Image (cartoon, rainbow, N blue to C red):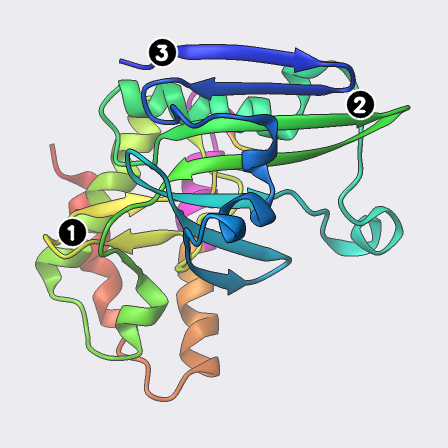
Amino acid sequence: MQQLQAWQNGSVTCWYDAAALPEFSATCFDAAYWQQRDAVLGQSRGRGITWFVQGSVMPLVLRHYWRGGLMGKLLGDRFFYCGLKRTRCRREYALLTYLADAGLPVPRAVGARVVRRGLCYRADLLLERIPEARDLVCLLRERPLTAEEWARVGGVIRQLHDVGAWHSDLNSHNLMLDAQGKVWVIDFDKCDIRGPGPWQQQMLDRLLRSLRKELTCNVPFYWQESDWPALLAGYQAD
């Protein structure tokens, strides 16, 4: 059960789980905080740098929010402010908490920070790091997944749909398997809960396009079209 706390000082607002982040301070959303404590475990680069750090309770992921596309070139990491509850990090924090409490395999959010500057804000998120988990692309560069593993992937997508969880970018990088073979879903930025509709099939279509794209970009890549029915069988199973 989360011990959700709110903290505000001037233009800075934070939310955090006191049980998971007892060392909370507003600066723990800065990479320098962890670097000074020799607590950085690693990093990955995408739109920005994602930091893997060791908290006092669990390993964590620190992510700064960046814009994509043309707006990213113009505004970088600045977003228009329309109230705290509508900030990207607060919405993702709330959605992940809801899904985790419902028993879905998603990382638990442990902290979020909003720094407002006039009409804009910048944001950060701290998440539980899933131990010994790798995304599908990393795995498929090394080996094929079994039909049972593909069925588990499909089953998790169905779990999301059954609770109305729309994922805005369900691709092969945002699905992970841990050392025990459990499937996880990550990166719920700009996602939400909605009623049944065409978006459910669109999520599946997006994942299929992602796998086809990775097949053209990676050699070797152990995925083939004949793997897709196993995923759909897991999705359609009771």
Q: Is residue 225 magenta?
A: no
Q: Amino acid at mark 1?
A: Ala
Q: Left or right: where does residue 188 sit relative to residue 236?
A: right
| 50 lies above or below 216 | above
Q: At which x and y percent is residue 167?
A: 47, 38
Label 1 environment density (alpha carbons within 10 Å; few <14, some 14–19, many ≥20): many
Say which mark, if any, is on residue 3: 3
How far apart marks 3 and 1 lie (CA) works out to 35 Å
Whether label 2 touches label 1, CB < 8 Å: no
- Identify the residue at image location x=64%, y=42%: 65
| Amino acid bearing label 3 | Gln
Vertical comparison of 214 with 195: above or below = below
Splitting the image into 4 quarters, where does residue 102 fall?
Answer: top left
Judging depth in this view, the residue of 120 and 102 nearest the camera is 120
Q: Secondary structure at mark 2?
A: loop
Mark number for residue 29?
none
Q: Position of residue 232 (x, y in %)?
A: 23, 50
